[in-house]
């Protein structure tokens, strides 16, 4: 067995609040990771930057529209969301006890966070879900998966969640 095969692979899986990312993680665990291997799945949640709104008062002095208490509450909420997403992802991974799991929560734009983590960690593969936005929505919001596929050096697997039969009725 070659040295690269014996050390296992490091697979970065980007997770967020959407069901698409959890489906991608589940699909990765069932189809990409190998039982009894030394594969490591790195879960990555990109915490969106906190929007700070400010304006100018009549004297030209910056005025922040949120008090420090509100800012703390917003940050606390963002942290709770991040922890909830990670816990859900870890629960999925726990069904595959032979796979090592690492978790990372980073702040910033998802495109930059995911591409930066893939490079910094030197991962063998990046797995992400596709939100399946249409052309217009994708033009305004941008496609995180498309950006990452174009900018990371490792193979990128974009997992599309099948439409459920309930949605088709």
Image (spheres, rainbow, N blue to C red):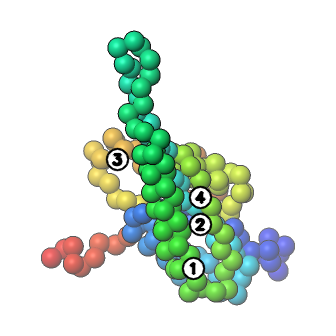
Of labels 3 and 2, earlier in sequence is 2
Q: Look at mark 1 in the image and give the residue it sits on.
A: 93
Marks 2/4: CA–CA distance: 8 Å
- At mark 3, the secondary structure is helix
Marks 3/4: CA–CA distance: 25 Å
Marks 3/1: CA–CA distance: 30 Å
Q: Residue at x 56, y 86 (%)?
A: 95
Residue 89 versus residue 10: which sits nearer the camera? 89
Whether 160 is drawn above or below 107: the answer is below
- The reply to whether the C-beta atoms of the residues labelled 1 and 2 are less than 8 Å apart is yes
Q: Look at mark 2 in the image and give the residue it sits on.
A: 43
- The reply to whether the C-beta atoms of the residues labelled 3 and 1 are less than 8 Å apart is no
Inspect this view and state whether residue 29 appears: no
Marks 4/1: CA–CA distance: 17 Å
The quadrant in which residue 12 appears is bottom right
Name of the residue lying farthest toward the left: 169
Give the crowd class for mark 4: few <14, some 14-19, many >=20 residues within 10 Å: some
Identify the image quadrant of the N terminus: bottom right
Q: Which mark is residue 127?
A: none
Q: Look at mark 4 in the image and give the residue it sits on.
A: 105
Give the crowd class for mark 1: few <14, some 14-19, many >=20 residues within 10 Å: some
Q: Which mark is residue 138?
A: 3
């Amino acid at each position: 067995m070659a040295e690269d095969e014996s050390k296992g692979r490091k697979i970065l899986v980007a997770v967020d609040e959407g069901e698409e990312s959890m489906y991608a993680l589940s699909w990765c665990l069932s189809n990409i990771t190998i039982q009894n291997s030394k594969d490591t799945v790195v879960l990555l949640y990109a915490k969106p930057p906190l929007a700070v709104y400010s304006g100018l008062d009549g004297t030209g002095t910056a005025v922040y529209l949120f008090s420090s208490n509100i800012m703390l509450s917003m940050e606390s909420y963002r942290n709770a969301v991040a922890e909830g997403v990670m816990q859900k992802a870890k629960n999925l991974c726990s069904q595959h006890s032979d796979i090592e799991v690492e978790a990372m929560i980073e702040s910033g734009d998802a495109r930059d966070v995911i591409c930066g983590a893939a490079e910094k960690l030197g991962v063998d593969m990046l797995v992400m879900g596709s939100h399946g936005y249409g052309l217009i929505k994708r033009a305004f919001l941008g496609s995180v998966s498309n950006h990452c596929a174009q900018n990371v050096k490792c193979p990128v697997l974009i997992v599309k969640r099948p439409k459920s039969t309930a949605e088709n009725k």
